[in-house]
Structure formats: structure tokens, C-alpha cells
Amino acid sequence: MVDPSLQFWLSVVMATAWVILSVTLVLFALSRIKKHADSKEGWQPSYMEMSAIWAAISALWWIIAGGFAADRMTCIISASLFGLSIGALVGFIFTSYTEESNSVGKVRDWLVAALATLSLAEAATGAVHVRQLLALFNDPAMSYPMGVTLANIVAFAVLGFWGSFILRELFLNIRFARARNERKRLELALDDVEPAIKQIAVDRRTSLSHIRDGGVATPEQRDVAARIVNLVRAAKISFEGLAKDQALIVAECYALSEHFDAAASMFVRIVERFGFDEQAVEGAAYCYECLGAFPHAAKILEQHRDKMGEHIDQWLGYYLLWVVDRLEDAASRSLRYIRHNPEIDLVAANLNLACAHAQLFARDGNPSDRLQALRIVRRMVEIQPDLKEWFRRRAVWDQDFFVLKNDPDFLQAVGPSI
């Protein structure tokens, strides 16, 4: 029970609030009616305006029904919110549309069956449980009619039902239907592009950006990827709403559309959410490479090195060239890849190894690194003479062979600088 002196001041405050709220509500209604007086339809309150009006009317009712007493108001407000919640839940479930038959529709059917069973059981017991429920919202120390509590719960349950019903019909169902349509379009598009995306992921393993020209995707595939990215953005589909295969395809499409930052983030999140996936790890490394973030690319590959194939040594042999204090690791990775794969084309790995030794010679001045770099250069131009131009260009502007720009043995192997 509230102290009598405190109750007096609470009653004064509530009475004042009641007067202010009443005047505000009347003035608001009059201002809206006056504003739309010249309109043919007159004032037609929006959903938000009606919600505000009903909230004000509810507050006025609570004060009156509670007799300006805090204890009674607490009971009546609790009963009102209970009824409103039940009505809103029922309204939400019973206004589901056809496509929700496998989700909300099942809940609706279960609810109907449960209510029917409970109603029969309650009728057989003389509504004992209903009386017990109503008693929860009445203070035994106060003389308060239980019928008022029941009427309050029913009234607010009806209000909650209609509020939820109008909200669903005017706003939510439309947005749900639009989102489902967008998602279906996205799923169909993902199914169409999935084979091409998987092939691109396979091709990426044998392609490094420093020796390829134009990438591994066709213009048509890039256009499809851009459309899928636009679909994802238009439908506002979150990463958490995608299955693993779908997330991988969407991430690849972001990469093909050259949204490398977003694609790298998505690939990393795929690994964090679903566990190790080789395509996701390689995709993240590729995107970091395109962003010029070679240390990040090397880091994510090294984190999962034990779970991946030997081709990762070739990638690391390239990425670590961009980390000055890890040039030895770059050379060892390339050399390891070459020794374990003597039967395949090793142009990229040998070029990486030559670059590593040239940079080590520039950094430390060790003659053995110069000899190793020159040995690889000679062998590569003998096998593939058109690489002479590549070496000459790298000696002019790139850090790899700049230290050998005027070296007589280097110039003899590749020709004069341009």
C-alpha cells in the first residue's frame, strides 16, 4: 500500500496529467479537423495518428478506472497490457497470407486447436482458471470489481487485434510479399550463375594477378554478378539470412563486381560462421590482393595453411614479396612449391622466386641472392623468350629488379633497359 500522504500528491499529479492530456487530445483533434476542412474527404487519421490517439485515450481511461490511486492504476494497466499483447499476437497470426502457410499458418492452426480444447475444458470446470487469472490483476487489499478487469482485458485485446490486423494489411504483408519476391528472384539468379561461379573459383587457384591480364571472368559473367549484387541490395538481404552456398556465390559476385572490400569481409564472415572453407579463404585472399592489402592476404592463408593444398605456397610466395621483413619466407614458399610440383608449368613460382632473391639482394647486399636471381632470369628467358620484356619493365619501375637495372649480366640476359 502507498503511504496516504504520498497517495494524495500522486492523485494531484495524476489529476493534473489527466486534464493536460485531455486538453492536448482535444486541441490535436481540432487542429487536424481545421487543417483538412477544405478537403473533400475531411480528416482521415493515419495509422500513426490513430495509434497516438488511442494511446492518449487509454492513459485517460487508466487514470479514471484507477480512481487516481497508484495501486489500482498498476492493476488496471497490467490487465490492459496483458489483453493488448494477446490481441496483437492473435491479430498477427490470423492475418498471415498464403505464403506463410508453412510457418505462421501452422502456428495459427495449433493455436486454434489449443483454444478449442482449453475452452471445452474450462467450460467443464466452471471457468475456475479464468477467475484465477483475473485475480492476478486485482489487489486483495482493495475492493475492486473483477468485472472491470475482465472488460478491460477484453477491450484491449480487441484493440490489439485490430491494431495488429491493420498494421499487417496496410504495411507488413506488403513488405513481406515484396521481400519474398525479391528473395525468390535472388535464389533463381544464384542457381543460374552457380556453375560459372564455381569454375571461376577453380580458375583462380592457377591465376595470380601479377602475371594474368584481364582476370578469369567474362564480361557476361561480370554483368550477371552485378545484377545479383543489385538484387541483394534491393531486397536488403542480410548475410545471416543466407545459406553457406548462397553466401559464397554472393561473395563471389561482389568480387566480380569489384566490390572487393565488401567481398573480403563476407568471405571472412563465412569462415567465422560456417567454419573452414577453402573457397572462402582463397576468395578473401584474392580480394585482399586486389585491394593491395598483401599482408592481410598472406595472414589469412597462413591461418589455414594446414587445411589447404600445396598451391597455397605459390600464393604465399607472391603475397610475402610485399612484406619487407618476410622476403626469406617468400623465397622459401616459392622454392617449396617448385620442388613439390616439378611436373607442371612453374612460370609464376619461378618469377616469384627470382623477385624474392632480387629484393633480398637489394635489402641485404648478399651476392648469393644476386646469383640466384640471375640464374632464374636466364633460365626463364631461355624457356620463354617473351619474358625479356617483362623483366626489363620490372627493372625500370618496379622494386623487384630495380637493383639489377644496370647489372651487365642482367642486361645480357634480358637486353637493354627501355
Image (cartoon, grey):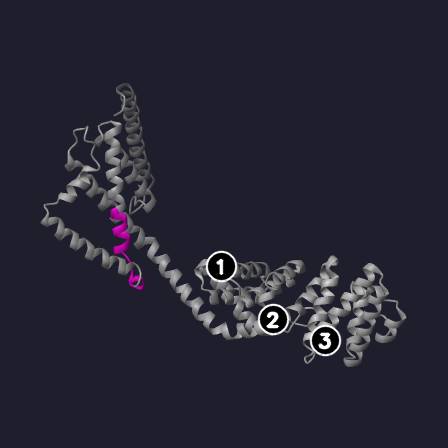
**Disc sitting over residue 309 in the figure:** 2
Q: Vertical placement of 223 versus 63: above or below?
A: below
Which of the two marks, 2 or 3, is nearer to us in this view?
A: 2
Residue situated in front as seen by the camera: 69 or 224? 69
Residue hosting label 1: 273
Residue hosting label 3: 347
Residues at circles 1 and 2 in contact by the CB criterion of under 8 Å: no
Q: Position of residue 288 (x, y in %)?
A: 63, 61
Instruction: Estimate the spatial distance between the alpha carbons at disc 2 and disc 3, rounded to whole Å.
Output: 19 Å
| Badge 3 amino acid | Val
Residues at circles 3 and 1 in contact by the CB criterion of under 8 Å: no
Q: Is residue 42 left or right of residue 305?
A: left
Quarter containing the N terminus? top left
Residue situated in front as seen by the camera: 195 or 418? 195
Q: How many marks?
A: 3
Instruction: Estimate the spatial distance between the alpha carbons at disc 3 and disc 1, rounded to whole Å.
Output: 37 Å
- Magenta region: 86-101
Residue at the spot 67% in from the left edge and 60% down from the top edge: 294
Q: Position of residue 97 (x, y in %)?
A: 29, 60
Quarter containing the C terminus? bottom right
Q: Earlier in the sequence, mark 2 or mark 3?
A: 2
